[in-house]
Amino acid sequence: MKKQQLAIILIFIFAILFGLSVIFWLSDNPVNTEPVQYTYTVVNVYPHDDEAFTQGLIFEDDFLYEGTGLYGESSLRRVELETGNVIQNYTLPPVFFGEGITIFEDKIIQLTWRNNLGFVYNKHSFELLQEFEYPTEGWGITHDGRRLIMSDGTATLYFLDPNNFTKVDQIEVYDEEPVTDLNELEYIQGKIYANVWYEDKIAIINPQNGQVTGWVNLEGIYDTTNQFAGNVLNGIAYDAKENRLFVTGKNWSQLFEIKIIPVE
Ligand SMILES: [Ca+2]
């Protein structure tokens, strides 16, 4: 009888351990690793300055903030969503090619393309407070509340300490193959949304491992007939309070509020 009881207890323990190991295995190996394909609907269309070579876009405190590029034309702007009017502007010295922007606490951070230099501004006054250096090109920037997240046109995303701008981590973004030309960024509900240069698609990226978990296909959202080839989709902003997603492109005359929808 004792032997039988012992056997039952051992079987019971074994069953629990087996069950736990299956749970751990499943959590480490998601069954479905195929990225979700999304399409979109346009909720609202707003005017956008077609002189703005958009390199950075964010939404905060009921305003859009935009960083523009090109030598001699780079700027940092506060923009009224409904009218597209630029209500505050800082023009960068012509030696700098402005790139992505993000707002961390009460500071705006702006990258430059090949100057290896970033700028830190007072969010309200646009007063230049600080500069910092980085070794790569600068393309897009966002943050996850703890760390700045930066792209440089490759498949790598860099995580930076927001206090001293040193690199604390990096990931390679991939969907079977590495996804290169990662451009403007936005951190939305635990995922990194990234424009891919010269693509009409936005990658949705798992910040833990770089895996692309979704693709948003925005083909046809803007009429690019008679547009320069370089006037590509670039600029993702998110209104966390109202859960609104905005996209635009370089020198586009329109900015779109969209909803994304999984393709059946
Ligand atoms: Ca953005």
Image (cartoon, grey):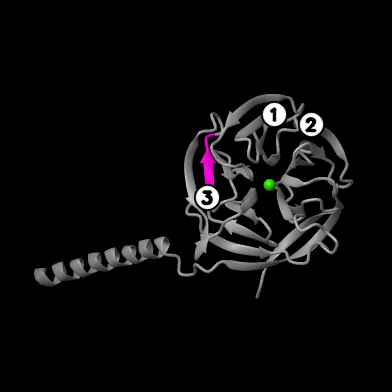
Q: Residue at x 64, y 25 (%)?
A: 130
Q: Is residue 36 visible?
A: yes
Disc assigned to residue 156? 3
Q: Is residue 244 visible?
A: no
Q: Residue at x 66, y 30 (%)?
A: 120
Q: What is the three-letter code of the residue carrying label 1? A: Tyr
- CA separation, marks 2 and 1? 10 Å
The number of callouts visible is: 3
Looking at the image, do the residues carrying marks 2 and 1 touch, with CB atoms under 8 Å apart?
Answer: yes
Q: Secondary structure at mark 3?
A: strand
80 and 19: which one is in front?
Answer: 80
Q: Residue 67: x, y in percent?
A: 74, 40
Q: What is the three-letter code of the residue carrying label 2? A: Tyr
63 and 175: which one is in front?
Answer: 175
**Is residue 55 located in the magenta-colored stretch of the structure?**
no
Where is mark 1, residue-wise? Answer: 121
50 and 62: which one is in front?
Answer: 50
Highlighted magenta segment, given as a residue range: 157-161
- CA separation, marks 1 and 3? 26 Å
| Magenta part, dominant SS | strand
- CA separation, marks 3 and 2? 30 Å
Mark closer to the chain start, 2 or 1: 2
Q: Is residue 83 above or below residue 12?
A: above
Q: What is the three-letter code of the residue carrying label 3? A: Thr
Disc assigned to residue 90? 2
User: Is label 1 or label 3 in front?
Assistant: 3
Q: Is residue 255 above or below residue 168?
A: below
Kindly indicate the quadrant of the structure image that contains residue 35: bottom right
Q: Is mark 1 within 8 Å of ligand 1?
A: no
Q: Residue 193: x, y in percent?
A: 63, 54
Kindly indicate the quadrant of the structure image that contains residue 141: top right
